[in-house]
Amino acid sequence: MNRIFKTFFAAVMVLVLAACGSTPQPTVALNTNILATPDLKIGFAYIPPKEGATTHIYGAACLLCYGVASALTGKLDSHLESSITTQELDNIKQLVLAEYQTRAENVTYVELPNPINKMKKFKGELGFAKRDFRNLKTELGVDVLVVLDIYQHGAHRSFSNYIPNGDPQGYLSGLLYSVDLNTNAYIQYLEINEKIQPTGEWDEPPTFPNVTMAYYQAIENTKQKLKNAI
């Protein structure tokens, strides 16, 4: 029950923040000219999801509705939590690193000294990061920071209060962006939001083969999207 309350209120906060936000940052195609700069140093940071694979519920707008929705996805949650590891996410991380290494000679892993949401805000226009990354140029010794931030993975299911709008879908969401640490401008910005409809019947416990296959298809689609973008 604690998990239900925590996840519900986290989902509410996401909706509130989204409603209060400004104009969304559009996609920024990778600026390969900057990456071609001689002696450019690139740092790559990976931020894993805060929880493991599970069913992410959207549209259950009251606590009772969320409780009903969570009960409906309980068996699928148990399957995803017990069978989906972080291996595919690690593969995505390695793919991004490898693709950037084809663009520049000096690309290394870095550990961020502080969580991004604790960093100072940056008052810039669209095309600039909302947090001020510029001090990391000295702290990390790099010129460009690449961040792969995976938000959620597993399944996505939409509800109208407690009534399902459809079947659970294979799901992966996150963000890939790169920041020029001289200007705080994005040199790449790409949202990841893959939802794949299962083929055939989805409600087949205990292994839910069609939802599981849809999840792995979301992974593969994400890999291809990243390859095309870098």
Image (cartoon, grey):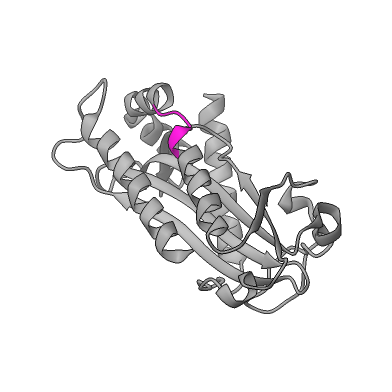
Residue shown at 35% from the left, 24% from the top: 79
Q: Is residue 92 above or below residue 29?
A: above
Does any portion of residue 160 appear in the rendered image?
Answer: no
Q: Is residue 209 above or below residue 218?
A: above
Does residue 2 appear left or right of residue 74 in this picture? right
Residue shown at 65% from the left, 49% from the top: 45
Does residue 170 appear left or right of residue 102 in this picture? left
Q: Is residue 161 above or below residue 1?
A: below
Query: Where on the picture, by quarter, is residue 65?
Result: top left
Please give the count of numbered marks on the rendered protein.
0
Query: Where on the picture, by quarter, is residue 32?
Result: bottom right
In this rendered view, identify the residue nearer to me: 192 or 1: 192
Residue shown at 46% from the left, 50% from the top: 173
Does residue 214 appear left or right of residue 132 in this picture? left
Prevailing secondary structure of the magenta residues: loop
In this rendered view, identify the residue nearer to me: 96 or 127: 96
Does residue 181 appear left or right of residue 106 in this picture? right
5 part of magenta stretch = no
Residue 150, horizontal then vertical, whole percent: 53, 47
Residue 165, horizontal then vertical, whole percent: 27, 49
Does any portion of residue 199 appear in the rendered image?
Answer: yes
Provide the residue span drawn in magenta.
84-88
Q: Residue furthest left?
A: 200
Residue 152, horizontal then vertical, whole percent: 49, 43
Residue shown at 61% from the left, 65% from the top: 20
Residue 158, horizontal then vertical, whole percent: 34, 48
